[in-house]
Image: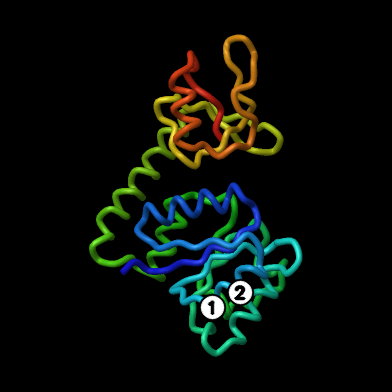
Amino acid sequence: MAQKVLIIEDTAINLTLFTILFKKSGYDVHGANNAKEGLKMAKVMSFDLILCDLKMAGMDGAQLINLIKAEDRLKSIPIVVISANTLEEMRVDKGLVAGYIAKPVQPGILIKKIQSILPPESGEVVDSRAKIKELEERAESRKAHTANVIEGFPVEPVAVTDLEVGMVTGDEVTDNNNLPVMPMGVALTDKYIEKLKSMDIQEILIRK
């Protein structure tokens, strides 16, 4: 049976991307879009690892971590923090977390860190390693492109044929008649990708 991971992240796009990445790496993933919901899920379900952001509306990650570690049934679950804020900034006791990864996140680094703490089932390791290699090779190939920054997000051109589910548009996509096809900041789905492939569009800007 796959290892169960709870992802607590209040940014919808990030929650979607992390969920897709973890599922492709062989984990059974459940998501919560705020700390309160995440705590409730942790109490009623059983998880092997918790991944959480720190700066969230309402209850923040530091408060959440303290509450989880105060529960006898939950205190042994490893927690990995993923955030643009440092543990010191958010006043998180380093002894309570199993790891910290700064945003923006490299997918290969994230999965390697999780696997070092919670290895997937033996039958899933090969597929997971292959996925990490694929992600790292794609990241290396992108370095050859000139990256721009739009509204604070680094973006780069990606051929429509190379688009994958979960990638996020870095700019508004328009057709040859300058009519909008999809807005900025949308996580691609199979339907969106097929739509782009059916049109006379060669590449679009994707957030790195």
Q: Amino acid at mark 2?
A: Lys
Which numbered dot is residue 54? none
Which numbered dot is residue 40? 2
Q: Which residue occupies the extreme right position in the image?
A: 58
Image height of 181 relative to 79, above or below: above
Q: Position of residue 2 (x, y in %)?
A: 34, 66
Image height of 13 relative to 125, above or below: above
Nearer to us in this view, 134 or 64: 64
Residue 196 appears left or right of 119: right
Nearer to us in this view, 111 or 17: 17
What is the distance, in whole Å, between disc 2 and disc 1 at their CAs?
Answer: 6 Å
* Image point (61%, 28%), residue name: 182
Nearer to us in this view, 23 or 125: 23
- Whether residue 28 is visible here, answered yes or no, is yes
Image height of 152 relative to 53, above or below: above
For mark 1, give the secondary structure: helix
